[in-house]
Amino acid sequence: MSSKTYYDPADLKKFGDIAEWNDDLAKRFFDWYNAVFEEGSLSAREKSLIALAVAHTVQCPYCIDAYTVDGMKRGISEEEMMEALHVAGAIRGGASLVHGVQMMNKAKKLGM
Amino acid sequence: MMIKSLKAQNHRLASTEEQLQFLNNGIFASGDHEKFEIYLQRNERFPLRPAQLEILQVNVGYMCNQTCKHCHVDAGPDRKEIMTRETMELCLDVLEKNQIPTLDITGGAPEMNPDFRWFVEEAHKRGVQEIIVRSNLTILLANPKYHDLPEFFAQHGIRVVSSLPYYRRNKTDRQRGNGVFDKSIEALQRLNEKGYGKPGSGLILDLVYNPSGAFLPGDQMQLELDFKQALKKDFDVSFSNLFTITNLPISRFLDYLIVSENYEDYMDRLITAFNPSAIDGVMCRNTISVDWQGHMYDCDFNQMLEIKTSPAAGQHISEFDLKKLTNRAIRTDQHCFGCTAGAGSSCQGTVA
Ligand code: SF4
Ligand code: SF4
């Protein structure tokens, strides 16, 4: 059986390689990226939890991997990580359901 | 149920040759990864040389009342190796004659050595500037004969350095055994009662944090803040400093890495995080480590791998010669990547 899949955990380490085909934009991206995660009005810890939640929402396995490790390094507990995920999940679910109003509006308008 | 030490299990990793074989022939055998020596060479630091000797770290025995999963000593209740008073005498002479400022007593649980108190008292009498005891905390409650240790520590101005993997129960207990967290907190409270970790008391109580798994420790300052806030709020416990320490891939932690299939990724993480500015602060540069039989090593980790100080520098405390030791080459191997990863790691925590 082939072990090839679309995602390879080893690719995460090669993230920096995207600079190979456009150094300038990659540099600007990484500078901005790093600045985003610095201690600011939000703590780096809070940002790490936000990143973890968002990673699940965009379903990026690389980011899930990276921000789970980051959270553990920071001493963020499993419970805190799971709560952050539920927040992401709640927004995701709510975002689908709230469009139900649009559906209802349309259906009511079309119906007699 | 108490887990057994690797030694008592006759585990293959109880053999230090096996460990070194594995470390050198695992991911380094393919040639995809360069060895630690090459990293030192590239930074013009090979062979690694010592700085001024400041600490004599004496391991008074591998016996311990706990069997923590990550223990790099492979300590436990089934380990019987114990330092005699004669060997302690030799250590005391060395401390005195060479004006070494710090005696760092470790184990196992050093308090379980029957001559532990004698050793501390003698060192105190002979004017050793700083005496450190690495206490696992729970030993202070393990048996009534240890209950007065906080007082004993305070009387002799001992600096107590204690490991507490986390400020919450579950993570600590997972690494160190069920019930360890609650007992550790009670022991910390007893130390606090004697003035330990209280500002102005002069009695220092440091905590050691090491990650409960296959990842590197985070920022030491931030973790210290988190620990201080949580321990104060939840248990009214205070302490002086938090030191973050990286788990080195030896002994029981190595076994854990292999069994949990984390070994390659962990080594990779250590190597990728190699930080040249951590080289200066690694503990082998200002420390000599002595085992229960009096053999000398560049550090506690080398002791556990039975890599003695270079033969030219002398290998037993009875042949201690400061000049020879100062001129020695420190013996490094692949486990050393743990000391130079990220912010670096030593007995005093972060170094870079
Ligand atoms: S308390 Fe320390 S010496 Fe004892 S088993 Fe745990 S890590 Fe090892
Ligand atoms: S493991 Fe020991 S010899 Fe190697 S760098 Fe760390 S302190 Fe030095």
Image (tube, coloured by chain):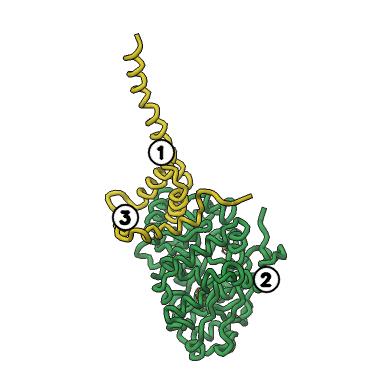
- Identify which amino acid the numbered label 3 is placed on: Phe
Would you say residue B46 is visible in this rendering? yes
Q: Nearer the viewer, mark 1 or mark 2?
A: 1
Report the residue at 43% width, 51% height from top.
Answer: A67
Per the rendering, the mark at residue B15 is 2
Q: Nearer the viewer, mark 1 or mark 3?
A: 3
Residue B52 drawn above or below residue B247: below
- Identify which amino acid the numbered label 1 is placed on: Ala
Give coordinates of residue B194: x percent, y percent: 44, 61
Asked whether the residues under marks 1 and 3 belong to the same chain, the reply is yes
Question: How far apart are labels 3 and 2 at the CA level?
Answer: 49 Å
Q: Chain of mark 2?
A: B
Question: How far apart are labels 1 and 2 at the CA level?
Answer: 48 Å
Q: Chain of mark 1?
A: A
- Identify which amino acid the numbered label 2 is placed on: Ser
Give coordinates of residue B325: x percent, y percent: 51, 87
Residue tagged 1: A88
Report the residue at 51% width, 73% height from top.
Answer: B34
Per the rendering, the mark at residue A29 is 3
Q: Mark 1 or mark 3, which has the lower sequence index? A: 3
Chain identifier of the yellow chain: A
In this rendering, would A108 be left or right of B274? Answer: left
